[in-house]
Image: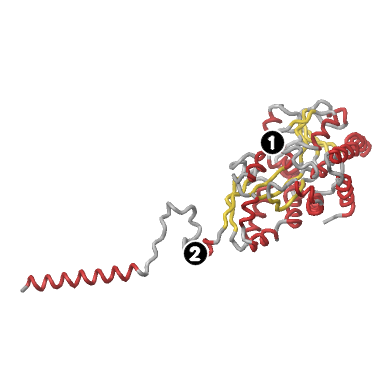
Amino acid sequence: MKNKILLMALAVVVILSLVLVGCSSGKTTTSPSTSAAPTTSAPATSAASANVITLKYADQNPNTGWEGTKAAQPWLDSITKATNGRVQFETYYSQSLFKGVDSWTSVKNGVGDMAWMFHGYWSHQTPLADVLSLPFLGFKSAKQASGIFWQLYEKYPTLRDEFKDNHVLLTWTSQPYFLITNKKQVKTIADIKGLQIRVPGGPPTETMKALGAVPVSKGMPDTYLALQKGEIDGMAAPWEAIVSFKLNDVVKYYTYMPMFVVYFTQAMNNAKWDSLPQDVKDQINSVCGLQGSLFWGENMFDSAVSASRATIQKNGIKMNEYTLSQDELDTWSSVVGKPLWDAWVKEMTEDGHPEARDILNTTLGLIQTYQP
């Protein structure tokens, strides 16, 4: 009798267990293992996380430098905000994804989705846009020149076509470059003759040749050691680069003149851009275009002038400074100003771009009238 009761009790327990298991399997969702998830920023079942678009962003400069803290990261954050968090970034600063000199082709080939681009690395790739880098045009600020660049980009299809291998989000330029040297102060054209000066490609290279200097091509992250070891005698530079790359540690002399500006883009892989939903494209564009161009010119370059000087002085580093007199500046301009403008127009016209003269005249006109 006792055995029958025990068997009946065991049967009831088994039946109840099967019922409970059946009920629980219909109500519980199994979470994916954490090892399979690339990030743990949001639950896998979140509707928001399912819509997140993560882009690989590359920048040759350090994230702790002026450009990284004042321009790049705030701008990336503005995209995330404009898209209501749908666009997020994996950031690769300090050439950690690819070298700055390889950024255009690396984005084109999909190694990264988006990058900071310095077009001075690629001589003759965008020759019509080189109008911006002609010497002694008279730009007043990086913000002004950046706005002019975007207007040229929008107005001239042939200039815009030079950038077709990637999708350009915005354009900007530096403030006018001046000269820094480590052996002697440059005060006249005679002083610069024979010096090895690091400059970008295109018109800046031709400018140095016309001045009698020896132009040297070198990536910006490599300039500190080149100056320190005496591989170059100096370079044309803006204030932002001097402090971001600590060039003030290895140069002694500063010679001020508005030599030329150099130009940049923020660009995305074409296929990646095409894959984005239209509403996301519109949201990204809201912080790009002319507005984004002005932001980058002002925040990367113009805002760095007083801050850079203050940093150098705070660190007790001696600066030997010299500003060209107007007479001397006129001499430099007569040698490397209009003659190189005319040479550029002639070269572009011979290469099948009769609009080159109009592009130059538009640029000169906007310098006189456009002040954002």
Q: Is disc 1 surrounded by few (<14), some (14 to 19) or many (20+) residues within 10 Å?
A: some
Quadrant holding the C terminus: bottom right
Outermost residue on the left side: it is 1
Q: Is disc 2 surrounded by few (<14), some (14 to 19) or many (20+) residues within 10 Å?
A: few
Residue 27 placement (x, y as % from top left) = 37, 69
- Residue 231 drawn above or below residue 359: above
Residue 70 visible in image: no
Q: Secondary structure at mark 2?
A: loop
The answer to the question of whether label 1 and label 2 lie on touching residues, with beta carbons closer than 8 A, is no
Tell us which disc is closer to us: 1 or 2. Answer: 2
Residue 155 placement (x, y as % from top left) = 81, 53
Picture quadrant of residue 80: bottom right
Picture quadrant of residue 228: top right
Outermost residue on the front side: it is 352
Circle nearer the N terminus (1, 2): 2
Q: According to the image, label 1 marks what residue?
A: 219
Which kind of residue does numbered mark 1 sit on?
Gly
Q: CA distance from mark 1 to mark 2?
A: 44 Å
Q: According to the image, label 2 marks what residue?
A: 46
Q: Is residue 338 left or right of residue 249?
A: right
Residue 151 placement (x, y as % from top left) = 81, 53
Which kind of residue does numbered mark 2 sit on?
Ser
Quadrant holding the N terminus: bottom left
